[in-house]
Every structure is written in C-alpha cells, then in structure tokens.
Amino acid sequence: MVDIWLPYGKTEVCVRVQAKNLLGSIEPIDKPGVPDVKAEIERSLMEPIGSKRLMEIVKPGDKVAITVDNRISTYNHILISSILNELSGAGIKNENVTVIMAGNTDACGDRDASISLGDISRHVKVVSHDMGTNDLIYLGNTSKHGTKVHVNRLFAEADVKILVGDISLHSFAGYRGGRYAVLPGIAGEETIRNNHAMLIHPNARSGMLEGNPVHEDMTEAARLAKVDFILNIVTDVRGNIVKSFSGDLEKAFYNGVKLMDEMCRVPVDRKADIVVVSPGGYPYDLNLYGALDCLENIIEVVKRGGVVVLVAECMEGYGNQIFYEWMIRFKDLKAVEGAIKRGFVLGGHKAFHLLRALQKVQIILVSAIPDYYAVNVFKLKTARTVNGALNEALKIAGENAKVWVMPYGGFIMPELKAA
C-alpha cells in the first residue's frame, strides 16, 4: 500500500492505493517562494516589463484608480502599499487614489477582501465594485466578438489605471490575471454575461489562451479601458509568492503565464482509469461550485468511462443558487448549451462544465454535502471516506485499474506526452 495525503478543507485525508494500481502522484513543479515578499514586489515595480516605471507614468495631480482582484487578499496590503509608495514618490496624494475591490464572480474569493487592506483604507478611498450597479461607463464594443464593454465609472474616469491580481489557472479564461481584473473584475453584468457565454467554445478551457475567445474578449475590453500598468503575482500551492510581475497589460501578464506554465504543466505518459483529486483544500473546496474547477484541469488524463474521486470538503454546500437551479432545470448538456446560447447567466456555466465531465466519467464525491443534493441534483455518486470512494471506483473500473492521485488539482495541468 502507498499512502498519499490530500488537502481537505483546512485539514488532510489519506488515500491508500495498492502499489500495483498506482501510476503515481502528480503535483505541481515546486519553485522556491521568495524570502522577502516586500523586496520582491519592490523589485518588480522597479523593473517593469514592456513599460516605464509607474512613477514615470503618473504626474502630480493625476487621479489614480487601482483595481484589486480579491482572490489574493493575503497580499493586498503589501501590494497596494508598494504601489502607493511608488505613486507618492511621483507626487500623487492619497486623496487622489481610489482602490476598487473587484466584483467576485468566483466562489473562493474573499467575501470582504477590503479588510485585508488594513490601515490603507484609512488613507485612500476604498470601494467595492458591484456588477449590477448603474454607475458604469460604456467604452465601446469589442471588435471581434461584439461585447458591449461597460466598466466601473471611477475606474474609467481615472487618469491612470492600475490592475492588481494573481496569475493562476482558470477553467475557461485560460488564466486569471492581467485583463481579468477589468473583465469580469470591474465590468457590468451584461458585459460579463456576453463574455462568459463564449465558454462553450472548444478553446475556452483551462491553460489555453491562443484562440480562446473569452481571453481575447477580456484583453480587448482591458485595452478599451486604457489600462496603464499591472502588478501580478504568481504563488505556489502553499500561497507563497514565487515571483512578481509588473508593467504592460499584456507583456507582464504573458511573462507571468510562462512561469505559471513551468509550475503547473506536468507531462504524464498515460491516462488513468481512476483519478483521485483534491482541488487543494481551503478555500478552493469551500463549496462544490468552486471545487469543480479542478475537473477542467485533470479531465484529459482520465480514460473515457473512467472514474474521478473528488475529495472536497464543501463546508458551504453547493455554493451557488443558479448552479443548483440549472442542474434541476436542465437534464443534459445539450439543454444547458442551448440555454447559454440564448442568454448566459452567471452560475449556469458550472452546470455546463459538470455535465460535460459527466459525459466522459463517473464522479464520486467525498464531501460534507448531504447525499440528497450530491446525488439527486448534481448527479454525483458519494462516499463517506476517500478510501471508501476508491474502493467503489475500483469496483466500477476493475480491480486492476490504474490510478493517478492529484493532491492539488486546482494548480496543475497534467499533459499527455506525444506518442
């Protein structure tokens, strides 16, 4: 037997796999975290990619808007403080700076990320973006996909516009980071709906940027918003900053994506009959809505007709009412795809991703969600323990089934080697 520990909420659980079945444990490529976070952020600001330094972009009297993607709340204070120091050095007064906390369309973002700004909120204006607000400005339509771009008025009317975020895998935008802080970050609901409706495109998937219409549309929206500067970080599975990237909207972002790829793209030589996967523990398994994101990363290394054992605590249950309603209302993938084409609604996309995965594999969920919801609404099998789930999976796939274990499914993109 081989014991492998998987994150589960704020703790861990152990799966025991017979050596004859185990192909191995697939984990992200480890890169060392920086020893001094503040020094790394400051280095990044002094060495922008494809751009002048921020203090060379602004001039005294400018109104500055900083949009913060709230997934990285652990580092909000130091990121914003470093930017404010840079602005101060160029003569920008605090009263001319507004920090906009991006709207949260994901399930694992901080509910009140502005708290993590600490004393910053006493010195500069801090507001939270509401995608349903009327206080938006229309910037034009994207040329290729025709999305009407409406963004937060405070951001649009600023003289200098800065984006702060993290670069990580995203189930249909390819990656978070860069342009993501504009769309969906500070965009209007109609803009987000039009953009996210393109998730049914075959190139709208995790780790894919080239030919991905969602990404292309987000990038053009950010260009229309005239973003001047970005500050993005890449973190490891433990949340440690590996490197910081600042500068041009696209060049700095793509440099960060390159590092992310070095960490998350892991070659494998074969598909498995069974994959045992954890999204990575809290907060990535806070609810089913967020936990399912990891399926998009790992589904290609499971054989058709195989089994996924999803180990996710889901202490907040299923996490999104629209997701729940669409799973009840629509009985198959074709019906959900039709609904998305007629009028995308945030939350509905998760039903699309789940039903698409269920066309290929069976999913056994180990969680705190009551069986009634997991089985009857979300069409999953359940087990009380991870080893009970693995035993059930072996009954389905056969006693000689081959198994991959992935403790950090939300951070990894296993790729089959070319034959």
Image (cartoon, rainbow, N blue to C red):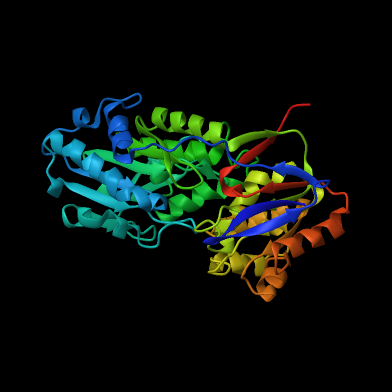
Viewer-closest of 23 and 322 = 23
Q: Position of residue 320 (x, y in %)?
A: 54, 66
Residue 260 point in image, percent of width and height: 51, 35
Q: Quadrant of residue 206?
A: top right
Identity of the residue drawn at 20% across and 27% down? 56
Q: Tell me, yes or no, if residue 81 can be seen here.
A: yes
> What percent of the width, then of the height, locates residue 163?
33, 41
Taking 58 as reference, is 6 left or right?
A: right
* Residue at x 37% of width, y 52% of height: 74
**Is 396 above or below relative to 299?**
below
Identify which residue is drawn at 48% across, 39% down: 217
Is residue 308 visible from the viewing direction of this image?
Answer: no
Residue 60's quadrant in the figure? top left
Q: Is residue 374 above or below residue 348?
A: below
Depth check: 140 or 99 in front? Answer: 99
In the displayed structure, does residue 385 sit left or right of residue 344?
right
Pick out the residue farthest to the front.
Answer: 1
Image quarter hosting the C terminus: top right
How many discs mark residues in the rendered view? 0
Q: Is residue 2 left or right of residue 315?
A: right
Residue 255 at x, y = what percent? 44, 28
